[in-house]
Image (spheres, rainbow, N blue to C red):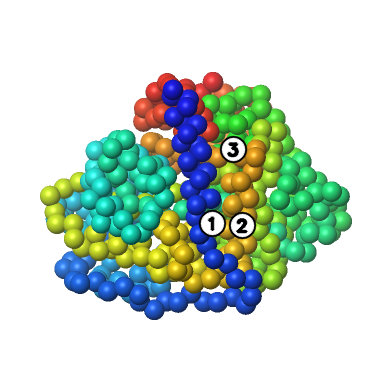
């Protein structure tokens, strides 16, 4: 039964994206800017400044768009504070200790909310969800928000994934018979290698810098594609094969990848021709040069096409304070016109019915199609970001980067590195008493690395 419930959740997560894309209207003509006119009216204004703590939209450019564009029509004052997920619990505690009546909204990923729920700091959001019934949130997302199986602890806010992007200059170097939609990891290596041999250019790029999301590539793409796991098979034979593969691929990766945090810029400058990153972090390349780039799904490995689903929500901390101001902000951020604005400005996809939304510019339709092709793949291996790690989430992510550094950059023995770091990962899992998360399935708690 446990396996069946986990499998059902996997299917439901896939349906989230299918439902979203089925209601989008697309236009293949000239791009149209979304209608930013205010299409909603509040009967009251917030009486206090709302502190918006967020683990999302951390990059400076995204945070600026949040403050200056997405929130600009809200009738009250919002202090938007994006930060690392390992710090949000401390931020909540410090704010409420200084002022127990502080108006606080939490914007975070599903895994962050799972950690906050286990810490006992979240207010149930079932009443707020019922008042937003007209939003037509997919029931699949609502079910995911029921962290205790009964009550919603966050309101769906936005969703995203990660995709590959190529400059059209690179397409003539594709291996014979290779298709972007069906590219394998072996073909990716051949593609990057051929560009290097014929041009001398290391054309492949990854966001492996300090603020990049390279750890998600390992957790949600390489590991699932080579081992059908994100954690349980961390030190398996399949994992050793994966790291051997990536060490070879790295020979064709632009050396500045170690300082790249967002891949839009190196794509626009032409320093790289092929890149992987979060949809929100490549959108600028398509905005500025929509005719130069093409988005396509992640490659396929021996165990299938691994990809990561990102679902973010809006919640409130537990307490006796009045919540009408916070509810107004949540209502605002889930308005269809603001959801459309969030998509066009940041690349985060809507979670509400968008049947009446403006047509998508072609570059956004292309990005959404790439995500959908990942989701629709018969050999898809959907993966969640880490769930239930709380303040240790950053340490968990860093261990994947440490593993990469030791094996790929420093040439240390893969078996020894994986054994040592598996032990460190297990300590983090044990400390959080975390259950396994997709694609790993186990009845054990804490999750135990094989």
Q: Mark 3 = which residue?
A: 381
Residue 360 place in picture, x, y as percent: 55, 69
Can see residue 8?
Answer: yes
| Residue at screen point 41% across, 58% down | 352
| Residue at screen point 24% across, 42% down | 121
- Toward the viewer: 33 or 88? 33
Discs 2, 1 touching: Cβ within 8 Å:
yes
Discs 3, 1 touching: Cβ within 8 Å:
no
- Toward the viewer: 257 or 106? 106
Within 10 Å of the Cα at label 2, are there few (<14), some (14-19), or many (20+) other Cα atoms?
some
- Marks 2/1: CA–CA distance: 8 Å
Within 10 Å of the Cα at label 1, are there few (<14), some (14-19), or many (20+) other Cα atoms?
some
Q: Mark 2 = which residue?
A: 369
- Marks 3/1: CA–CA distance: 19 Å
Q: Is residue 59 left or right of residue 125?
A: right
Q: Quadrant of residue 215?
A: top right
Residue 384 place in picture, x, y as percent: 49, 40
């Amino acid at each position: 039964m446990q396996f069946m419930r986990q499998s059902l959740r996997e299917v439901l997560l896939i349906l989230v994206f299918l439902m979203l894309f089925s209601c989008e209207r697309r236009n293949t003509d000239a791009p149209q800017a979304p209608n930013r006119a205010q299409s909603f009216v509040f009967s009251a204004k917030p009486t206090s400044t709302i502190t918006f703590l967020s683990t999302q939209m951390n990059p400076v450019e995204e945070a600026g768009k949040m403050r200056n564009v997405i929130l600009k029509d809200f009738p009250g004052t919002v202090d938007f504070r994006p930060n690392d997920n390992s710090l949000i619990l401390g931020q909540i505690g410090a704010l409420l200790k200084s002022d127990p009546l502080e108006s606080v909204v939490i914007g975070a990923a599903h895994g962050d909310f799972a950690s906050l729920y286990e810490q006992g700091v979240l207010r149930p959001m079932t009443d707020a969800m019922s008042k937003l019934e007209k939003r037509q949130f997919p029931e699949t997302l609502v079910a995911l928000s029921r962290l205790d199986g009964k009550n919603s602890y966050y309101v769906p806010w936005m969703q995203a994934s990660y995709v590959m992007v190529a400059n059209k200059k690179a397409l003539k170097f594709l291996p014979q018979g290779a298709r972007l939609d069906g590219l394998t990891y072996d073909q990716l290596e051949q593609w990057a290698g051929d560009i290097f041999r014929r041009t001398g250019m290391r054309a492949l790029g990854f966001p492996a810098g300090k603020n990049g999301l390279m750890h998600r590539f390992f957790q949600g793409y390489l590991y699932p594609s080579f081992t059908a796991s994100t954690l349980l098979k961390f030190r398996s034979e399949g994992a050793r094969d994966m790291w051997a593969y990536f060490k070879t691929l790295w020979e064709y990766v632009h050396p500045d990848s170690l300082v790249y945090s967002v891949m839009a810029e190196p794509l626009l400058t032409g320093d790289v021709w092929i890149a992987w990153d979060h949809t929100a972090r490549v959108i600028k390349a398509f905005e500025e040069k929509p005719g130069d780039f093409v988005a396509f799904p992640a490659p396929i490995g021996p165990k299938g096409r691994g990809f990561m689903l990102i679902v973010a929500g809006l919640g409130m901390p537990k307490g006796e304070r009045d919540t009408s101001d916070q509810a107004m902000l949540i209502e605002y951020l889930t308005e269809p016109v603001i959801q459309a604005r969030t998509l066009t400005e940041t690349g985060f996809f809507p979670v509400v019915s968008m049947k009446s939304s403006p047509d998508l510019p072609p570059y956004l339709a292309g990005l959404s199609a790439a995500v959908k092709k990942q989701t629709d793949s018969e050999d898809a291996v959907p993966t969640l970001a880490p769930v239930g790690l709380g303040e240790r989430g950053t340490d968990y992510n860093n261990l994947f980067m440490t593993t990469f550094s030791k094996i790929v950059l420093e040439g240390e023995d893969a078996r020894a590195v994986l054994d040592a770091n598996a032990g460190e990962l297990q300590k983090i899992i044990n400390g959080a008493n975390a259950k396994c998360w997709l694609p790993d399935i186990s009845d054990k708690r804490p999750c135990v690395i094989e």
